[in-house]
Image (cartoon, rainbow, N blue to C red):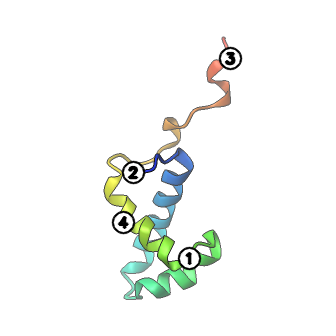
Amino acid sequence: MEKPRGMSYRKRVADINRIYDRHARSGLSNREIWRRYIYPVYGISERTFYNIMNATAGLESPVVASDMPSLFDSIED
């Protein structure tokens, strides 16, 4: 049974993947990318980093701001 995930999790996954993709081409190992660029920003363990990398297979659509609810959605014009 898969745990339901919120928009903040999906955004964090997208951000971590963006950081990973940016530095993966330079030839650094996954551990080095996690240690230098991901851990200082997100403070996640290496195991969590790998779990997030595997979670990308479940994201069919990219996370965009228009998908997120706004506080102003309930205000009438």
The alpha-carbon separation of the residues under discs 4 and 3 comes to 39 Å
The alpha-carbon separation of the residues under discs 2 and 3 comes to 34 Å
Query: Where, by quadrant of the figure, is residue 28 drawn?
Result: bottom left
User: Image point 56% across, 76% down: which residue?
Assistant: 45
Amino acid tagged 1: Ser
Q: How crowded is mark 1: few (under 14 residues within 10 Å), some or many (20 or more)?
A: few
The alpha-carbon separation of the residues under discs 2 and 4 comes to 13 Å
Mark closer to the observer (4, 3)? 4
Mark closer to the observer (2, 3)? 2
Give the x, y percent position of residue 6. 52, 45
Give the x, y percent position of residue 17. 44, 66
User: Image point 50% across, 71% down: which residue?
Assistant: 48
Residue under label 4:
54
Amino acid tagged 4: Asn
Residue under label 1:
45
Residue under label 3:
75
User: Image point 36% across, 66% down: which residue?
Assistant: 54
Depth check, front residue: 64 or 69: 69
The alpha-carbon separation of the residues under discs 1 and 2 comes to 21 Å
Circles 4 and 3: CB atoms closer than 8 Å: no
Q: How many labels does the image show?
A: 4
User: Image point 62% across, 31% down: which residue?
Assistant: 70
Circles 4 and 1: CB atoms closer than 8 Å: no
Looking at the image, tell me whether mark 2 or mark 3 is earlier in sequence order: 2
Looking at the image, tell me whether mark 1 or mark 3 is earlier in sequence order: 1
Decide: is 13 above or below 38. Answer: above
Circles 1 and 3: CB atoms closer than 8 Å: no
Residue under label 2:
2
Looking at the image, tell me whether mark 4 or mark 1 is earlier in sequence order: 1
Looking at the image, tell me whether mark 1 or mark 2 is earlier in sequence order: 2
Decide: is 33 above or below 64. Answer: below
